[in-house]
Image: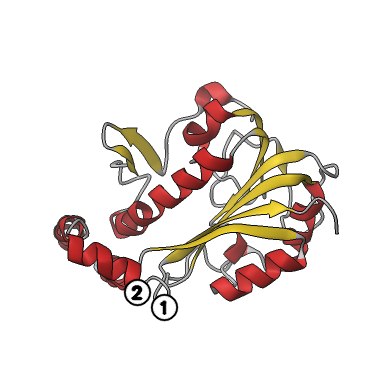
Amino acid sequence: MKNKALWQPTKFVKTKKGWQPNPDRTMVSKGSVIATAAMIAYYEKAILAHANGLLLDLGCGHVPFYAMYESQIEDVVCVDWENSMHKNHFLDIATDLNQNLPLPNDQFDTIICTDVLEHIYKPHGLLSEISRICKPGGKLIVGVPYFYWLHEAPHDYYRYTKYALKQMLADNHFKILSLEAYGGSPEVLADFVAKNLGFSPLLQIIHNYIWKNLLRISFIKKLSKKTGDKFPLGYCVVAERMSSF
């Protein structure tokens, strides 16, 4: 990663209570606090359990997970498209993710591709390329939204069910190690309302405060887990590149 010394937390920050959405609202908007909070624990668990060796942060943006995986890896290569809305100084390679990646076969021990796949209009092609550049036995960590608004338009093409993710990864020689929904109907409802309160920053603050506390209640937590299968806010997937195919 270029310019490592310039890196600063963006989407996530480490606190005494663990990883939290960045309180800086230029980094995480009021309308995105709930969704960001819902995904953190799942991404952290996946990264702590599987990130190692040479890691590729694909569609990296401002490299929001860097502080999570830095101590576990040997090095990181950052790749994104040059005209990304997240243009930054950390890119090692700027390329169109819908085209063949300018990287050698079997290079990476870990590949992270979070909140990227929905923006790829040729997702099978990208997954094929990921399979090519991932070492046999290497790990892929994928995160995608599901019940979520259109974002980064016009480059927002797909929403993936868990069934699509399983089949697409299997087609590209990956074995699923874990596939978990983050959020359920409470988080979907809370996120929907938060985003539709954009006309009133004050109402967004009040709404987020109320839901932050509601989501801590045992009954609401159980409801989230129970409804995550039918009403997922998004998914976090860990897959392993099969050694032979």
Where 244 falls versus 193 (above or below)? Answer: above
> What residue is at 58 percent from the left and 42 percent from the top?
50
The residue furthest bottom is 230
- The x and y percentages for residue 119 are 60, 63
How many numbered discs?
2
| Discs 2, 1 touching: Cβ within 8 Å | yes
Say which element carries label 2.
helix
> What residue is at 53 percent from the left and 21 percent from the top?
5
Measure the alpha-carbon separation of dots 2 and 1: 6 Å
Give the residue pinned by disc 2. Answer: 227
243 sits to left or right of 111: right
In the rendered image, is residue 82 in sight?
no
Q: Quadrant of residue 170?
A: bottom right
Pick the front one: 168 or 194: 168
In the rendered image, is residue 35 in sight?
yes
- The x and y percentages for residue 49 are 53, 41
Colour pattern: secondary structure
- Mark 1 belongs to which amino acid? Lys
Where 161 falls versus 72 (above or below)? Answer: below
- The disc label shown at residue 230, or none: 1
195 sits to left or right of 205: right
- Mark 2 belongs to which amino acid? Thr
Say which element carries label 1.
loop
Where 17 falls versus 241 (above or below)? Answer: above
> What residue is at 47 percent from the left and 32 percent from the top?
67
Q: Quadrant of residue 129?
A: bottom right
